[in-house]
Image (cartoon, rainbow, N blue to C red):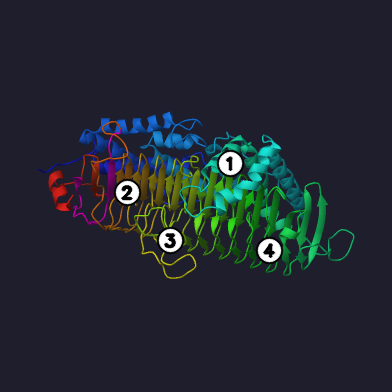
Amino acid sequence: MRRRFRLAGFGQSLRISLLLILGYCLAATADSPAVDDLPVGEPNAPGMVTLLQEEIVSGLKTRQIESSFLRFQGYAALKLNSTAGSRRSSEVTGNCRLNWYDHLLRNPLKAPVEAEEFTRQLHQALRGDHRGLDGALITAREKMDLGRREPTRFTPIESPEEALAAVKLALYGAQAGHAASLATLTQSELGELSRNLYPVLVTQNRKGHTLANRGMGRRLCDLMEKMDRGGIHDAAQALAPLVDPQLLAALGKLSEEERPSGPRSPSVAGVTGSVVRHMLTPAGTIVVGGRGTNTYQLDEMTEVSAVIDLGGDDVYYEGSVSLRRPVLVTIDLEGDDSYRGTNPGIQGGAILGIAMLIDADGDDVYQARDVAQASCLAGAGLLVDMAGNDTYVGLHRVQGQAFGGLGLLVDQGGNDRYHGALWTQGFGGPLGFGVLNDSDGKDHYYTGGLYSDDYEETPGYDGWGQGVGAGPRSVANGGIGVILDGGGDDVYEFDYLAHGGGYWLGIGFARDFGGNDRRGPTEKTYSGGTRTERSYQRFGCGWGCHYTVGFCFDDEGDDVYKGTIMGLGHGWDCSVGALCDFGGNDRYESTGSTTQGNGSQASLGILFDYGGDDYHQGYNQGYASSGISYHTLPGCGGNFSFLIDYGGEDTYGCKAKNDSYVRRGASGGFLIDRPLEESEPTETADADATTTAVGR
């Protein structure tokens, strides 16, 4: 039996054209917080994801399984309703749950459209200047259920003294926001947080999916919910003006001869090298280092709230931010600098504090251990590196990680290297908004390679990074994790549960806007040695696991995606996972089961590719199993799997033909291959014949 398929009321070519035009208009007129008006990525991406949405709706209607999908959608809503609130009625609870997460899981067909818009606008904002950062902070505040605020009105900076005054004002604002964030806690509760955050959330753990001390983890999350989290975001907003290029340029004009009365070079404990200014202010001491090489022992400078260095190849040691020193700003204007330390809360990192590190130029090296490089526990950590080929190395909760606050790493240029082991590179834990945004360059991202994975039945390492929002299982709901890359031929290495995914009621996003990129399991261990576990990757490249939503987008280039099982657009256990590639000749290399557009255990999985001659390895493209063990049929609706590929001469391991519309497994399994030219699909395979040929 052969069938022809067309979208009701439209020729396919006309439908594509209209939706892409609509997408371009949406991209041009969207109310974005960004100030950079240059195009970002594929301009037709909004229309493409709208086309994807229409294709899925039409497919459900054609198969007459709309009612089954509505049952799936209603079942997810029922689970959310029955677990709302903080009551411990099951392993799943509603504590730390975000409204946007709740909305996306309740509306799975709208989720790709919203995810595309969110990632595009956030990247556009973060590749801008201080106004863009301010816009990104507005977005973060809204997504974290803290309300809307108006954009900041910035004061023009015209002189070095005005720049120094702006630094003081930023410190006052950050300290006021920090104080407000803790005002709702008793001294006893604050002591609990201070004593337990680091050991319970970091050092006691060697598994990424939960905490060793779940009871105390839940208690800490309850206390973070009690905090005035708006104060944390107010503090970050107060620091946004420091990224103003005019302010940084004005600071660079400070003369080494223009200093207050006193010795020619004031002596400051903890500083080796020239000191231009040593300013005592109500917000703490501000130290201005000269243009030569300086060394800063920041933990010996406990009274210092801000360090400004005018130039030279400088070395910064430690720099912990905590209740002992709740606010620290570091601004380095020039030079190839080295930031080193082993204490937590350094290099734009904070525990119960507010930190910002700005490096304006140079090839810099950041070496740390835990809670560092724009990461936080119950606070805000920001790191903005404006230029240079930079290296970021850390272990746990580093490089844009947030658990109870805001972690934001922005690198605006250069060929950069990011290296971490666990909870890294755009990771959002409970009540956390964690982002890594790299604007340009050939970058290398690595997360994993150190700890054995969470699944005893399969080999591999834990990853937990690169755009992952996750809650610790049986403790709390997850937050928002995002990794965004603007261009260049990038390499992403990652292990289990990484790269554009959500776990345990969290949401995660990965997007690369340009270049020929390669994604797949780590090739060596974290330390660079030979792997003791064979190459195996589980949950990667657009996935959701346990009531979650996750997305991976790529705008252009000839890309390679690798994974072993449960990846490349995969949803597991009442979740949504989607991988969308908007252009290029791409390779999807996976040989294990449930990869390339699969929904399992009552979930929706999507792989959508637009344009190019693509290669799909393996046999499971768009395959939907009829069996579900986690939930009860027919109430949960079933499994829904979509592999949709538009254009090009494509190769499928399952032997599907180009220009075909194939049922894969159960009625919820779709493999749809369409041309971009005017002609309609002319050949499809009978569902039963295809199932037999594939051996399913």
Residue 543 appears at what percent x and percent y?
A: 38, 48
Task: Give the residue at the far left of this rendering.
Answer: 1
Q: Marks 4 and 3: CB-CB under 8 Å?
A: no
| Mark 4, residue position | 316
Residue 351 appears at what percent x and percent y?
A: 64, 49
Q: Which residues are magenta?
A: 636-664
588, 419: nearer the viewer? 419
Label 4 and label 2: CA atoms lie apart by 45 Å
Identified by mark 4, the residue type is: Tyr
> Where is residue 155, by image quadrant?
top right
Task: Bin the neighbour count of mark 4 within 10 Å (Cα to Cα): few under 14, some 14-19, many 20 and up.
Answer: many
> Is 92 on the left or on the right of 597, as rendered?
right
Residue 629 appears at what percent x and percent y?
A: 29, 40
| Sequence-first tag of 2 and 3 | 3
Front position among marks 2 and 3: 3
Q: Which mark is residue 220?
A: 1
312, 232: nearer the viewer? 232
Front position among marks 3 and 1: 1
| Sequence-first tag of 4 and 2 | 4
| Sequence-first tag of 3 and 1 | 1
| Mark 3, residue position | 493
On whether residue 624 falls in the magenta region, the answer is no
Front position among marks 4 and 1: 1
Could you tell me which secondary element the residue under label 4 belongs to? Answer: strand
Relative to 682, does residue 31 appear above or below in the rendering?
above
Could you tell me which secondary element the residue under label 2 belongs to? Answer: strand
| Sequence-first tag of 4 and 1 | 1
